[in-house]
Image (tube, rainbow, N blue to C red):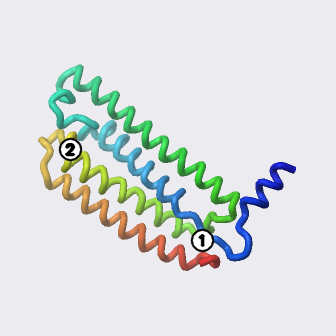
Amino acid sequence: MAQEAHSSSARPTGRAMPPAAAPAFLFGMGVGGFVDGIVLHQLLQWHHMLSHTESGNTKTVAGLELNTLADGLFHSAMWVLVVAAAILTVRARRRGRLSASWRFHTGLVLAGWGVFNVVEGLVNHQLLQIHHVRDDLGGPLAWDLGFLGLSVLLIAAGWLLFRQGKRENPSN
């Protein structure tokens, strides 16, 4: 009985609510962070979270230990984004606000991934300069700019897909 009361009170009355965008966008941000951390930090080892700092020098054991901790904290934050996205997805489903369009979701995932990369690229690479895309090569600016350019393309492609998917939803 309590479940029925919860379900009926969670559904919109009258006019249909638009599909929820936050779950897919947050998921994209989390996945973007995981791809960065797993591929660039761990597999390719181009950089770590603090590899462009004096204390994070990757040529010392202490620097590697510090970077391992920082990378772990970074991955933990990405995990929180993905869990938040899952919670919001369940909430949207219960409220009847989960879009059926794959373009809607894929577009928002790509846009979230791109936005994550732009923020990370501007803050960590340019503003704080705690690491760069290719610290293993001395942190050349061209790699940082290429990363930002690719990220803007992710946002643009994601936005276009999202807009197409939004038109597919009958509640818009």
Q: How many marks?
A: 2
Decide: is 71 above or below 157: above
Residue at x 48% of width, y 71% of height: 162
Say which element carries label 2: loop
What label does residue 128 carry, if any?
2
Residue at x 44% of width, y 36% of height: 76
- Label 2 amino acid? Leu
Calculate the distance from the C-alpha at mark 2 to the C-alpha at mark 1.
38 Å
Answer with left or right where residue 107 lies relative to residue 130. right
Residue at x 25% of width, y 58% of height: 148
- Label 1 amino acid? Pro
Q: Nearer the viewer, residue 44 or 47?
A: 47
Residue 168 x %, y %: 58, 77
Residue 14 x %, y %: 73, 75
Decide: is 27 above or below 34: below
What label does residue 18 carry, if any?
1
